[in-house]
Image: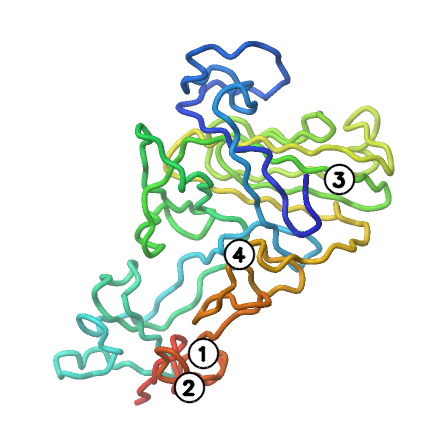
Amino acid sequence: MPRCRDTRRYRGETRAREQDANRRVPTAVTKTTTPSEANGCITSLDTWYSDKGAPPIVRDIVLFDNGNGGFVNRYGAMGEQWLGQAAYKNQRFCGNGDTMCVATPPSFSGCNFDATVDTCMYPCPAAIGNATDSCAAQVTPGKAYDGTPVFFPLDDLMQADDARIVAKIPTQYGYNWELDSAIIPGAKPHNFHFTTQVTYWFKYDAKAAARLDFTGDDDVWVFVNNKLAVDLGDVHQPVDGSVTLNATTAGPTNLNLTDGKVYKLNIFHAERKKESSSFRLTLAGFDTAKSECTPICGDGIVSLGEQCDDGVNDGGYGECAAGCVIGPYCGDGVVQDSEACDDGNRIGGDGCSPTCRVEIVK
């Protein structure tokens, strides 16, 4: 069940192997788990979404205010959106190593770095150079996306026979199936062998418009009051699905909801195919009652009134400090740690770069 904060708790993420490729909607069944299923050979959806095979692993997913009346999961632990591929204009090489794009020695004169229009980058983005080089370009930031194109909740768990696979970023998240290791610094191969079940309880309000939106791959089914509401079954690229609770959908011939009563919403998701795993869940209009809940600083969940919460909150540069406030960082207007400057913003071309390094304007 959800707790008194902007989070939703996973019922479980059950480890699975190569799941059955037949397209089927999960239904409640009663049977005894066979030895082969217990050892990871999945032949029934009952094994995917039950405690009969591998035990469930319970995790939390944090939903952030999307500014449009809903809450959605995001790529960053503190609600940062995923950024699609940036557009580069007039890109050029500016030297081996961190040269700060200064046109010296003379062999680098072709850089002609202009801090008023250009951004100096080290390491070079994969789209325009090598990670060991500096480069400059006029940069247009990529589109910001909710959800995440790298949904791998079991990467921290490993068994001896687990195969780890490098993921690719799909076009639905602003890239053209590039390897995530070329986009995310330090990205490693992932565990694709999992299914996910999300359980959420809500009080139905006939006067409010409640809506669930989901984007994901592969199989996704959503049940409301034990009735199928969204069917995105089969192996596929990220696909959108949604369900709106209104007088029509909540009626006795559909979801059969009664005003003021509490119902269960279940999301069943199965990752069945490498090389991509995306997940976007948006809930809007479900939490209509006034809440008296208060955040708990130190529980590792960023809640209302908290700037951050990493569960430790011991401070440090770029980290979360006591009281769940963000510690010193580039852009706070105070020169500290390894910063060469800090003018209170992260905008280039004003003498202090977005990484708090002195810019040489020519």
**Dot 2: what SS?**
loop
Query: In the image, what residue occupies the spot 39% across and 47% down?
Result: 169
Report crowding for label 1: few under 14, some 14 to 19, many 20 or more residues within 10 A (C-alpha).
some
Quarter residue 93 falls in: bottom left
Q: Are marks 1 and 2 in contact (CB under 8 Å)?
A: yes
Judging from the image, what secondary structure is the residue with disc 4 in? loop
Residue 347, labelled with which disc? 1
Q: Kindly identify the amino acid type of the residue bearing the numbered disc 3.
A: Phe
Residue designated by label 3: 202
Labels 4 and 1: the sequence-earlier one: 4
| Element at label 3 | strand
Q: Position of residue 16 (x, y in %)?
A: 44, 26
Measure how far apart labels 1 and 2 are at the Cα level: 7 Å
Spot occupied by residue 245 in the image (x, y as percentages of width and height): 76, 38
Mark pair 3, 2: CA separation: 50 Å
Task: Say which quarter of the image contains residue 273.
Answer: top left
Mark 2 lies on residue? 350
Q: Is residue 75 left or right of residue 208?
A: left
Q: Residue at x 32, y 37 (%)?
A: 165
1 or 3: tag closer to the N-terminus? 3
Is 289 positioned to the left or the right of 4 in the image? Answer: right
Q: Amino acid at mark 4?
A: Gly
Looking at marks 4 and 2 on the same chain, the residue that comes earlier in the sequence is marked by 4
Question: In the rendered structure, which amino acid carries the disc numbered 1?
Answer: Ile
Residue 311's disc is 4
